[in-house]
Amino acid sequence: GSLPTKNGNISGPGCLIVLDQWGHVRSTITGHGIDGPWDMTALDGGNVTDLFVTNVLGGIIGHHKSANGGTVQRLVITSGPGRTPYVLKSTTIGSGFSAKTDPNALVIGPTGDSLGRDGTLYVADSVNNRIAAIPDAVFRHSSDGPGRTVSKGAALNDPLGLVTAPNGNVITANGGNGNLVEVTPGGTQAAVVTVDNNSGGGGNLFGLAVKPGARAVYFVDDFGSDNNLQILF
């Protein structure tokens, strides 16, 4: 996902950039409800993939202002050997998420998202310090609004990156401090662990990924010049 800026200001709705296996840009995807892509997750079906993109621009700047606020867009994408991926269908499955500009983060809005085993899409609602759930995300034909609140407040502090653990729980990275928070589908905040103490950890955490075949999670530490990818066992 790419959200362009010019002279420090947002300059357009952004796009998705398609890279090949060598990291070369093959194409870009614009339109189809893409409006400030901030994070994404996918359900890989082989030649057809469902891509879930969170958008942060709706309702906050210029010609992007709308009643929809931040959105979640499901893009059905087809691809195959030697073919550049293209969009078959686009559906807004989430809308009305709070979003706002921010001098440090550029924009704050719906960020990380992850698909649960039962087809529920979990979304980090960063502005409201909550985890939202959109049921039947793969097959729904309309928006579920800002989704159902799974958990809010307490240890959640500007949740950003989000991933579903093998046990079905959701793990999110706080933008407001250096903590990872584990939340059950029922809303219980089951565990909190500090993974970044640098300057209190504020603004240092973002992306998350579960290590395949292991009880471990990769996380991005954006602190200062030490930008790196770390792992928590």
Image (cartoon, rainbow, N blue to C red):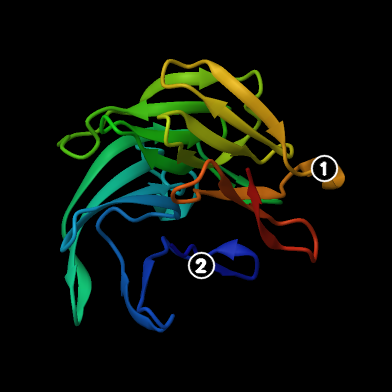
Q: Residues within 10 Å of mark 1 (few under 14, many from 20)?
A: few
Which residue lies under the disc numbered 2?
A: 4
Q: Where does residue 191 sit, x and y in percent of width and height? A: 62, 24
Q: Which mark is residue 77?
A: none
* Residue at the outermost right position: 199
Judging depth in this view, the residue of 98 and 151 nearest the camera is 151
Q: Where does residue 214 sit, x and y in percent of width and height? A: 50, 46
Q: What element does badge 1 sit on?
A: loop
Q: Where does residue 213 sit, x and y in percent of width and height? A: 44, 48
Identify residue type, mark 2: Pro
190 over 200 or under it: above or below: above
Instruction: Give whichever of discs 1 and 2 has the lower sequence position.
Output: 2
Question: Label 1 to label 2, Cα distance in Å?
Answer: 31 Å
Q: Residue at x 66, y 23 (%)?
A: 155
Q: Residues within 10 Å of mark 2 (few under 14, many from 20)?
A: some
Q: Is residue 97 left or right of residue 153?
A: left
132 over 88 or under it: above or below: above
